[in-house]
Image (tube, grey):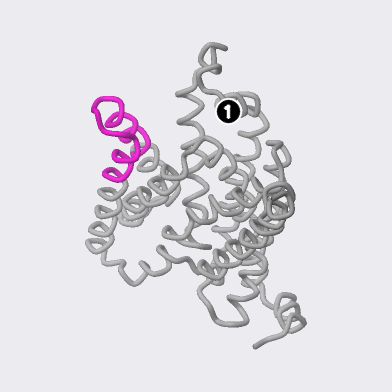
Amino acid sequence: MASISQFLSALGQYNFLQAALITSILVGVMSGVIGSFIILRGLSLMGDAISHAVLPGVAVAYMLGINLLLGASIFGILAAMLIGYVASHSKLKNDTAIGIVFSAFYALGFVLISLAESSSNLHHILFGNVLAVSDRDLITTTCVLIAVILFIVIFYKELLITSFDETFARTYGLRTQMVHYALMLMLTLVTVSSLQTVGIILVVAMLITPAATAFLWTNKLHWMLVDSAIFGALASLIGLFLSYTLNWSSGPAIVLVAAFIFGVSFIFSPKQGLVFKLKQA
């Protein structure tokens, strides 16, 4: 096993490792920030659905030779709209509509990938390989992070109100549906830009786990956004180190670190941790 000093030495020598580190941290930050709104709005299942629904978009974009973000974004928004339509025009509950739509899109993605004869890339699409990240991936991830930050800064008030009281938001005159679909678009962009790092299967974990960890430490939204970004970045940094030194897949390594940080927080966080509750009992 390589030591930390060896990892740092390699980091100074190899450009691919530098790009992997920067990309991992960027993905951790934006996943944590967007994930905060996802869990506050009770949309964890929607995050899972979007992350799986982008697969056919990725396949179509691959076959047409266009930017993956474009194809995946179209299918991600289409899935969100279809879920809303099915849930509002039937007696089915929202989670049922989510399960039907995302499983259908996911299956379609597999079929399209096999037709595109790109099954050799399927493992990286599903589980990620941050050590193979390109300069183009890094630029794309940076642009998505900037878009996410601008979106939150500009629409912070709308996101805050709709996340905690959608009924009041409607009476206040906010267009809640527009805010919802804008958030779904950001979620889709984050999902696609995370493919190279953690893959489709595990991206939902990065959307939920750092944000859930931050939720244990604070009840203020602005601090939750900051904490979730820190936890996401920390999980990405340590996960990349483990991936490089132990030859683990980058996605599972990053997600396991994020889960470990959540576990520690679940036990020791003030006011919500198990230790605190035992002391209060």
From the viewer's side, name the closer residue of 257 and 266.
Answer: 266
The residue that disc 1 covers is 164
Q: Is residue 149 magenta?
A: no
Assign the magenta stretch its main secondary structure. Answer: helix
From the viewer's side, name the closer residue of 37 and 5.
Answer: 37
169, above or below 33, in the image: above
The secondary element bearing badge 1 is classed as: helix
* Residue 20 on image: x %, y %: 61, 67
Tally the numbered discs. Answer: 1
From the viewer's side, name the closer residue of 195 and 216.
Answer: 216
Left or right of 161? Residue 191 is left
* Residue 9 on image: x %, y %: 75, 81
* Residue 216 on image: x %, y %: 66, 48
Left or right of 139? Residue 199 is left
- Please identify the residue farthest to the bottom as the structure is shown: 1
Q: Is residue 97 magenta?
A: yes
97, above or below 49, in the image: above
247, above or below 48, in the image: below
Location of residue 268 (image quadrant): bottom right
Q: Which residues are magenta?
A: 79-101
Q: Amino acid at mark 1?
A: Phe
Q: Report the quarter where the N terminus lies.
A: bottom right
* Residue 255 on image: x %, y %: 55, 64
